[in-house]
């Protein structure tokens, strides 16, 4: 399971990082621009840049780890025999 989660995260790394990099590159001129209305636009662009950086970390690290723990706990529940059932499977 650990190998499958790692391989899945690596498979998604390139498209997610390319999307985040493109959005951040598009927002940088807004963040560092000057002129009429730049103060307001800077306040809008800064959280978006931070959000794109955090979504990259969230998708690659946190969600993969949560899924791995979730599946591990599910596997532990299905492998543990229920009381009154000799193997935990089948009717009784």
Image (tube, rainbow, N blue to C red):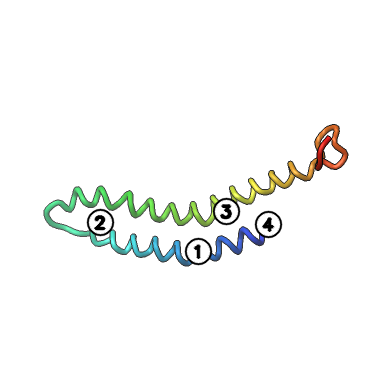
Q: Residue reaching furthest front?
A: 91
How far apart are the alpha carbons under marks 2 and 3? 31 Å
| Residue, far top | 84
25 vs 77, left or right, is left
Q: Which numbered disc, 2 or 3, marks the residue that appears first in the sequence?
A: 2
Return the disc, 1 or 2, that comes first in the chain's sequence: 1
Q: Relative to the observer, which residue lies in front, 87 or 73?
A: 87
Tell me, for residue 13, which label it has, or none.
1
Quarter of the image with the C terminus is: top right
Q: How many marks?
A: 4
Q: How far apart are marks 3 and 1 (CA)?
A: 12 Å
Which numbered circle lies on residue 84?
none
Query: Judging from the image, what secondary structure is the residue with disc 1 in?
Result: helix
- CB atoms of marks 4 and 3 within 8 Å: no
Give residue 1's mark.
4
Give left or right: position of 77 versus 36.
right
Q: Which circle's residue, 3 or 1, is located before the other in the chain?
A: 1
State the quadrant of the N terminus: bottom right
Q: Which of marks 4 and 3 is nearer the N terminus?
A: 4
Instruction: Give SS at disc 4.
Output: loop
Residue that mark 2 sits on:
31
In the rendering, which numbered label is found on residue 64? 3
Q: Is residue 19 above or below residue 66?
A: below
- Compared to residue 6, the image places residue 45 above or below, namely above
Which quarter of the figure has residue 25? bottom left
Q: Which of marks 1 and 2 is in front?
A: 1
Which residue is painted at 39% across and 60% down in the image? Answer: 20
Spatial CA span between label 1 and label 2: 26 Å
Q: Which residue occupies 74% across, 44% down? A: 76
User: Label 4 near label 2: C-beta < 8 Å?
Assistant: no
Placement of 77 over or under 12, stated as above or below: above
């Amino acid at each position: 399971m650990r190998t499958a989660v790692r391989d899945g995260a690596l498979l998604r790394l390139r498209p997610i990082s390319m999307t985040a990099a493109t959005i951040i590159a598009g927002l940088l001129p807004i963040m560092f621009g000057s002129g009429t209305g730049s103060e307001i636009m800077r306040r809008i662009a800064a959280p978006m840049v931070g959000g794109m950086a955090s979504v990259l970390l969230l998708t690659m690290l946190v969600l993969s780890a949560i899924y791995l723990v979730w599946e591990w706990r599910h596997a532990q529940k299905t492998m543990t025999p229920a009381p009154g059932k000799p193997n935990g499977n089948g009717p009784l």
